[in-house]
Image: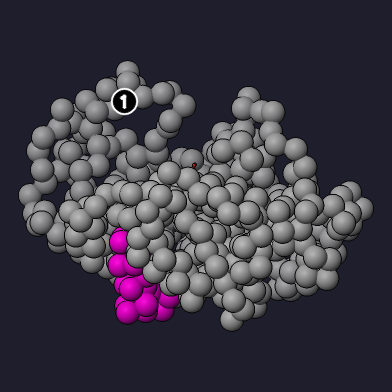
Amino acid sequence: MSTIAPPSITPLGGPSLPQERHLVTALPGPRSQELLDRKAAAVSAGVGHTVPIEAVAAGGGVVVDADGNSLIDLGAGIAVTTIGNAHPKVVEAVQAQIAQFAHTCFMVSPYESYVAVAEALNRVTPGDHVKKSALFNSGAEAVENAIKVARKHTRRQAVVAFEHGYHGRTNLTMGLTAKAMPYKSGFGPFAGEIYRAPLSYPFRDGLSGAEAAARAISVMEKQIGADDLAAVIIEPIPGEGGFIVPADGFLPAIVDWCRANGVVFIADEVQTGFARTGTMFASEQFGIVPDLITMAKGIAGGMPLAAVTGRAEIMDASHIGGLGGTYGGNPVACAAALAAIEVFESEDLPARAQEVGAILRARLEALQADDPRIGEVRGRGAMVAVEFVKPGTTEPDAALTSAVAKACIAEGVIVLTCGAYGNIIRFLPPLSIPDALLEEGLDVVAAALAAV
Ligand code: PLZ
């Protein structure tokens, strides 16, 4: 068992950690290896891991392991710790709430923080229509509930999701998710009445936004029929799919079609939400106002919380008692969310995401300029990806991608891969990362690319 605490953790946790990359062992070090051995014996083999360490502290732009290694974090726990890990305001809010009460179940005895989070989400999400919210535990659960209210409101059943989409690992959301391996393979049968439409993927389809939208709308009209279609769900920028920025006009055309046909448009902003893309929500950048928005990840500074926010008449379509769950909107998670939302606004984190994005893009585009293995650098704000291809083609190079990612991790830089073809590295650091540390992380990426 690892009992050593790294040297300089204060009661406020991670933010006081030295902001440096510092390796004292090869990864995994001996203490981490001990934990990974116990993991292999005790934890289901189905639960994988990307970085072979035992994490013991994290904050700013680093994750520290049990052997005293300090790694640069370019993944933010998959887009969760946007405001930074163990942010002091979140720590304080969580400690105060847990000392007051941990749980009553909002459906049994309501409390103020749940209502305050709903009010905040109704305010910060796009659109000035009357909105209502409901809180849940995970992104997948938020997506499930968005579909539930859309079906109840429209009295229709069919749902359209898109190629390269990711919406979760529960049964309904596996059905909505596009990629078989590792998310769906062998886990069927999946829920019925789910249809898949083609996405706009400018690097691969060369279509304008209008052309790509016409192609998707044709699938919806010919293969399903608007009269039976309850909802269209789409990530404005697919996250697990590879930060694919749709061509201009694609999303507005889909929204217009939905509105003309009484179809509920759901933006899944679980990954793009909360300042990540340089605005509070990615929808804003495409000039769209979703009927419903699903949120999780960055919402509560690392505590598990998720939400659906949208048009009051849709959110109110359910009979009383139709929505809920034992833990949904847990008071400790709500306290964390209120603190996190305060940080997003008072520290203008959308602007910080643009700064981080500018650093990422400048460095990665410079690499691309003389490396034909980089097919595209794309993204918005602090959500930037590199797509690797065989030089001179658009043929995905998954082997190169995984070799580069492994080399970065071995050198103490946490990076995540993604994409239908496994040929994309995505950069989504915590916005609390110091600029110099981000630059150093990108130096390591450049060196890894040169070496493999
Ligand atoms: N919708 C857009 O990105 C979660 C998945 C990690 P949960 N993405 C990370 C993994 O391999 O399981 C996600 C998302 C979008 C929904 C979800 C699901 O959110 O909180 O993981 O359920």
Picture coordinates of residue 296 (x, y %)? 46, 56
Quadrant of the drawing holding the C terminus: top left
Q: Which residues are magenta?
A: 335-352
- Is residue 359 visible in the rendered image? The answer is no
Task: Determine which quarter of the picture holds residue 12.
Answer: bottom left
Picture coordinates of residue 78 (x, y %)? 43, 51
- Is residue 338 visible in the rendered image? The answer is yes
Question: Which residue ends up furthest to the right in the rendered image?
Answer: 222
Horizontal side of 174 relative to 231 (left or right) equals left
Q: Nearer the viewer, residue 283 or 125?
A: 125
Tell me what residue is drawn at x 75 percent, y 44 percent. Answer: 194
Snapshot colouring: one colour
Residue type, numbered disc 1: Lys
Magenta stretch contains residue 339: yes
Q: Is residue 112 shown above or below 305?
A: below
Q: Nearer the viewer, residue 140 or 388?
A: 140
SS for tag 1? helix
Quadrant of the drawing holding the N terminus: top left
Q: Which residue is mark 1?
A: 39
Picture coordinates of residue 298 (x, y %)? 41, 60
Task: Give the crowd class for mark 1: few <14, some 14-19, many >=20 residues within 10 Å.
Answer: some
Magenta stretch contains residue 351: yes
Q: Nearer the viewer, residue 51 or 128?
A: 128
Main SS class of the magenta portion in the image = helix
Tell me what residue is drawn at x 32 percent, y 18 percent. Answer: 41
Tell me what residue is drawn at x 69 percent, y 33 percent. Answer: 190
Tell me what residue is drawn at x 23 percent, y 66 percent. Answer: 89
Picture coordinates of residue 354 (x, y %)? 44, 75
Question: Which residue ends up furthest to the top in the rendered image?
Answer: 41
* Count of picture labels: 1
Horizontal side of 237 relative to 355 (left or right) equals right
